Image (cartoon, rainbow, N blue to C red):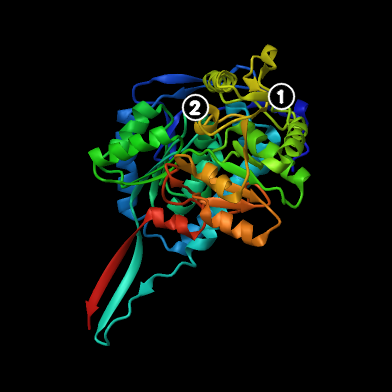
Amino acid sequence: MTTLTRADWEQRAQQLNIEGRAFIHGEYRPAVSGATFECLSPVDGRLLATVASCDLADAEAAVADARATFDSGVWSRLAPVARKAIMLRFADLIEQHGEELALLETLDMGKPISDSYGIDVSGSARAIRWNAEAIDKIYDEVAATAHDELGLVTREPVGVVAAIVPWNFPLMMASWKLGPALATGNSVILKPSEKSPLTAIRIAQLAIDAGIPAGVLNVLPGYGHTVGKALALHMDVDTLVFTGSTKIAKQLMIYAGESNMKRVWLEAGGKSPNIVFADAPDLKAAAEAAAGAIAFNQGEVCTAGSRLLVENSIKAQFVPLVVEAIKTWKPGNPLDPATNVGALVDTTQMNNVLSYIQAGHDDGATLVAGGKRVLEETGGTYVEPTIFDGVNNAMRIAKEEIFGPVLSVIGFDSAEEAVAIANDTIYGLAAAVWTSNLSKAHLTAKALRAGSVWVNQYDGGDMTAPFGGFKQSGNGRDKSLHAFDKYTELKSTWIKL
């Protein structure tokens, strides 16, 4: 962990040279139209950079370059062990530039610098490194055939991949896509969110420095309705991968159908239930985890434990423990290493979160913690972690993804009722169960319609476990060897001997 102080980070922020141009075929260049947009920091409202606002013309150039590079074989036909060596250098460079990348991440989207450096940068390097290490250890198959036939089942890279990533974990979500996509030999066009494009733009040069050939990784900053739409509709993009809202995920599926039936892999929204039974092994630990599950990253987490389901027999005892635990999560200047709650990504998102807090009041929920904008004098976008009790699943704050630090507490009387409430949602990304009963833990986990279920913890797992959702939380999986399925085609070759 870095030993830099707030003063150190602030000094480095003043000296930071921020690149805002697109990156195509190994070089930075402005948008074809010359258009730009302002990148403002949610920390204090300062202008960080003017960023290229790419559109159809830039998408055409980037896709043509990615296709030509793929077809040339300079990366796609490189031996897996050679791709591995280059990607390991890429991971090393991400770590070596970790303080710069962490600073860009914090200034750009408001998360605490300790998280940007200790979680996002390290996790991003780990994702690139893990996929690099795996690629020369995955074997193809030989089918069971008659003695005079040979059946081969091989994986081939899909070709040109467009990756549209969100603003809440800009570098890490990009790395979850880039790791398996690059390792399997594809050319990738990365479209970061217009709310947080800076780290994606920066790592494009690091990829070149590592030895990844020009044209293998292009980066197009810009808006979803312009360059994002252009990539989704492009006839020469083979696969589209996306992390973001369910609304946009559905639209991308439509675009794929309207164009070339490109494969579309989606990780979308969530409204994750965190279920605490009366026999939880440690109520204080469960309360602290419940607070962290909604306050971490300002609640801007697709797996945020935004619905806290508590068995009614302990509810009066447990909720005050959560209220006490949330007091340790205090909004502060993200450049202070002691800060654990930063700024929401922008004014639009802050106002959206505040509107949901008002909806909680309007629908009759009881506010028991937080609920206000704070630190307004800084010019930043800060909201207190907020807890509503007396919530039912019909309320907006319980049904809709807020993407902010707003927790809804819902009571239940039996395991069956808890599962029914938990599954009563369009989403199915994650869930947690707290109990000392092994059978109850397994049976509840089996009954929950979610891609990840954590027992006696919240947000467990690492690169070895797949990540993704059921229902309208998406399809396909990030992380683990299962992620390679998104970036490869299976080919059967049948040979008569």
- Position of 429 with respect to 117 (left or right) is left
Residue 39: where, in percent of width, then height? 52, 22
Q: Earlier in the sequence, mark 1 or mark 2?
A: 2
User: Which numbered tag is attached to residue 33?
Assistant: none
Give whichever of 274, 411 is nearer the camera.
411
Give whichever of 364, 175 is nearer the camera.
364
Name the image quarter holding the N terminus. top right
For marks 1 and 2, give the CA distance. 24 Å
Amino acid type at circle 2 is: Gly
Amino acid type at circle 1 is: Asn
Q: Based on the displayed image, in which of its 4 quarters is residue 6 positioned?
A: top right
Residue 53: where, in percent of width, then height? 41, 24
Tag 2 secondary structure? loop
Name the residue at 47% across, 31% down.
193
Does residue 99 appear anywhere in the picture? no
Residue linked to disc 2 = 20
Looking at the rendered structure, the number of numbered marks drawn on it comes to: 2
| Residue found at the far bottom of this picture | 147
Residue linked to disc 1 = 333
Give whichever of 258, 12 is nearer the camera.
258
Name the residue at 73% across, 27% down.
330
Mark 2 neighbour class, 10 Å CA radius: few under 14, some 14 to 19, many 20 or more: many
- 85 to 320, vertically: above or below: below
| Residue found at the far top of this picture | 377
Residue 245: where, in percent of width, then height? 45, 34
Give whichever of 103, 375 is nearer the camera.
375
- Position of 371 with respect to 482 (left or right) is right
Tag 1 secondary structure? loop
